[in-house]
Amino acid sequence: MASPRSRRTSEASEAAPAEAHGTRYPAVAHGRDETAALSKRLHRIEGQIRGIGRMIDEDRYCVDILTQVSAVQSALDALALKLLEHHLHGCVTHAVVSGNGAHAIDEALTVIRKFGR
């Protein structure tokens, strides 16, 4: 019997229904290697955030804490960029090919603008 984690991984490899993502087109699944790399990045970020919490609890020097906060922000930006790349190369490309490109491009531009703030 497959574990819940492996079931999620195998389910994620199939194109998800459009309704699950609030879009009119199906999502393009991440490959197993890409999903593992994204998960690894996220776990590393979680560890960094827990470390910041410990630093605050230990009343560490503010500049040291701020340095770690900056590192987490950079790591989150890198994660977001990877996700955006996947979205543009996978989901948006798929939407354009299937005739739903205008909506997908507008949605991508809205997300990109959020990062410009």
Image: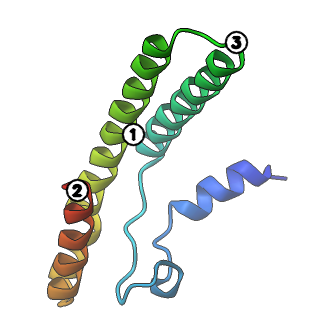
- Whole-angstrom CA distance, mark 2 to mark 1, is 15 Å
Contact (Cβ within 8 Å) of mark 3 with mark 1:
no
Q: Which mark is residue 76?
A: 1
Q: Disc 1 on helix, strand or loop?
A: helix
**Horizontal and vertical percent for residue 54?**
68, 19
Q: How many marks?
A: 3
Callout 1 amino acid: Leu
Q: Check disc 2 and report the residue beneath it.
A: 117
Q: Secondary structure at mark 2?
A: loop
Q: Position of residue 117 (x, y in %)?
A: 22, 56
Q: Which residue is mark 3?
A: 58
Please state which amino acid type lies under the numbered disc 2: Arg
Label 3 environment density (alpha carbons within 10 Å; few <14, some 14–19, many ≥20):
few
**Considering only vertical position in the picture, is 84 above or below 98?**
above
Q: Position of residue 36 (x, y in %)?
A: 50, 38
Give me the residue at 53% from left, 27% from top. Answer: 44
In the image, residue 80 sits, relative to residue 54, either above or below, namely below
The answer to whether 61 appears left or right of 5 in the picture is left
For residue 106, which numbered disc appears in the image? none
Q: Is residue 31 left or right of residue 94?
A: right
Q: Calculate the distance from the C-alpha at mark 3 to the C-alpha at mark 2.
A: 33 Å
